[in-house]
Image (cartoon, helix red, strand yellow):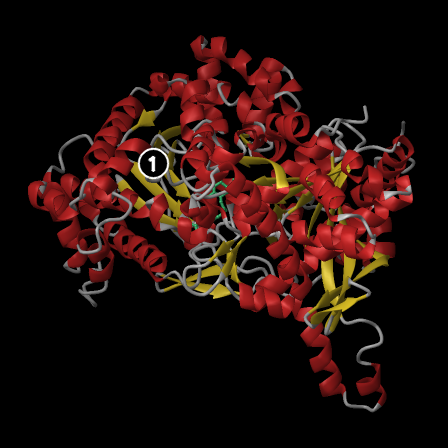
Amino acid sequence: MNDRTSNDLDLDHELLTNVGVAPSEATPADLMRAVAQTPRQQLAERWVETQAAERAKGARRVYYLSMEFLIGRTLGNALAALELRPHAASAVHAHAHRLEDVEGEEADAALGNGGLGRLAACFLDSMATLGLPSFGYGIRYEYGMFAQDIVAGRQVEQPDPWLADGTPWEFPRAGISVPVNFGGWVEEVDGKPVWRHAGQVCAKAYDMVIPGHGTRKVSTLRLWKAAAPAHIDLHAFNSGDYARAAEVKNEFENISWVLYPNDSTPAGRELRLRQEYFFVAASVADILSRHLAEHGSLASLADKVAIHLNDTHPAISVAELMRLLTDEHGMAWADAWAQATRIFSYTNHTLMPEALETWPVALIQQVLPRHLQIILRINHELLSEAGRLRPGDDGFLRRLSLIDETGERRVRMAHLSVVGSHKVNGVSALHSQLLVKTIFADFAALWPDRFTNVTNGVTPRRWLAQANPGLAALLDSTLGDGWRLDLDRLRELRPHAEDPAFREAFMAVKRANKERLAAYVKRELGLALDPGSLFDVQVKRFHEYKRQLLNLLHVVGRYQAMLADPHVDWVPRTVIFAGKAASSYHLAKQIIHLIHDVGAVINADHRLKGRLKVVFVPNYGVSVAETIMPGADLSEQISTAGTEASGTGNMKLALNGALTIGTEDGANIEIRDQVGADNMFIFGHRAHEIAALNQGGYQPLRIYQNHPRVAAVLDSISGGRFSPGEPDRYRGVVDALLGGGDHYKLLADYDDYVAAHGRVDALYRERDEWARRAIANVAGMGPFSSDRTIREYATQIWRVRSLE
Ligand code: 26V
């Protein structure tokens, strides 16, 4: 079927009629808006068509509930999906601009913190591409992830007003507005509970159409904006009290103002709980009204609806669905529960105990009194079932309970999610094994079949085709273009690794990408990089468990070794860091500062002859990642074994031809199984060995005392070698290792890590051999397409099928 609109972009017309500027005066930002109009119109048509087809077939749909969607920019992806890119490029050329520059005018939609949010965005791309009837539901934050400035080596957070100039990509659904209630109390009326709420806010729907690639099918990302109910501030306005009217309006609208940037400790704030319930209530109501419109009765709900909980943030939807089915629609509790547990499924994204979400019972009582009653009833039934299985085992019941009774009583959202779901999955093989051995061991004893694994993946459209056009073109000319929709085709690269001409072409692409990255760094930081040096890259959120500090210890150790032996033929290295630290995470911010201080000393030391450089690329996000990933030679995936649930940056880097230096953690293990252990640099203690260290009195001070090289590195940092103006600046950082017990075992893995870097250097000297192994990495990445991941969810968990 052909689009009604022509594929040739009439930019002058769009500029005049949609943007409202004279074509001769259009800025690149104007051009961005003008170019967006054609894909926007085509997406609108495809959306209408997709909805009609799904409705006509009475399709079962999956609803992906997530507080975060880290979308990044949309224009490039939309043009590619709609096959409009050549048309757009020539139209922009006619205006004497480059399409890449015009694309660069779009603000990132950074509605997420990191891995979890980006995974949700990759999943939408795959759901659309596979033609799965699907909706993502989330919050239309006015302000996304904070922008990171670096001032004198320190992180400074700036607001991210990504909607300030509007976005061409949203479709406000004026007719879709859902009232959401808060607070108040519960009354019994004729023996039935009635929630007398104290406040109400309106959820207004804004859709983003998610294009599928190689299909006309699209998916929908429906984001909710909080608004005051229309009646509310009329009185203040009428009486001319605008300040009071604005205040009232703000009290309602603040719910969707800002993404919680806290990736270090769960934000136990009331506003956060309100955000969670706000988007859950609007989404579940929307799902039920669509179901009733299409099928007329709720009896078939579980046959037509799958709801996925992306982490525990939407867990309150279990209680909300029960409330709607029983209180509002009069369904019997047991029938409603049978439906709910067929409908929900849940993904856990971290084992770290401090990251597991709990809410004080008293707060839920205050904000959601009816939901608390429902949670307590679910708990009662859970504990009865468990008590029948293990009579008298109070420890078992206490550990399973939805309520943590130690100290202030709190609701365990992970437990609510497990109890309400028919499937619970981890995000890599190791992570899923550890889940049933640790935090969910008791639930696994109760319901062993509920637990499963679905290893993460990334979309090859954004992370290869779009981010790395050079490699994409080489793959197209070598394998054809089928890899975009069938990443397993990359396997066919293996024989080409033995072809010298292919290796040359591959390395030329890598070189060009390194030059592009170097040019970006030059523009942003004024720092010149040597594209001939080994680009050693660690990009991710800053967390102690991810061990950016271990990387930096290696850098300092190498610096000392180079000064001790300047005549050795050192392999030139550029060590690149990027990532944000949660604003309240002091130690993580200190490490960012230390990276800058170490960089300032090393980059200015002429004795090194430019053979070591340290760079911190500010404001890491989706668009910055698209520039960094293709330019990396070495991918640092060095978390303490057993701590990184999966990682997805590891996949993006390997897919772009970087070799991994990494621990046996998360998906690194499965990547190794696919690309081959010879093509990776694995080091460090394994998860069970780390567990043993934790049991057996690990003593980092011993390592310090017995390893002069470790001591020299730590002493130089704590002694002020990199902060001469404030010699004590990094005492605390080093104390966390030596005095604080080195929780993440940096010192235990240091020697093996340095040895692995020695193997990296040796291989980098053999350019041809490096090329072979880099190609082997790309060739092995087929299984890490999010298309594979989504197929597994669709068949094993959601039981949804493509309409085609
Ligand atoms: C982690 C931690 C770690 C310790 C301190 C407190 C804290 C708070 C939040 C988090 C992140 C939790 C959720 C998350 O983003 N997990 C990430 O999900 C990705 C997608 O599945 C996965 O690739 C990452 O390994 C995982 O960290």
Classify 593 as above or below 425.
below
In x, y percent, where is residue 634? Answer: 37, 32
Badge 1 amino acid: Ala
Looking at the image, which residue is at 32% across and 39% down? 640
- Residue 184 picture quarter: bottom right
Q: Is residue 709 left or right of residue 167?
A: left
Q: Quadrant of residue 8?
A: top right
Image position of 427 (left or right of 726): right
Residue at the far front in the pictured view:
392
Towards the viewer: 303 or 557:
303
Q: Residue at x 59, y 29 (%)?
A: 789
Q: Is residue 601 above or below residue 430?
A: below
Q: Is residue 52 visible?
A: yes
Q: Is residue 348 visible?
A: no
| Residue 155 % position (x, y) | 41, 61
For residue 450, above or below residue 25:
above
Residue to which mark 1 is pinned: 641
Q: Quadrant of the C terminus?
A: top right
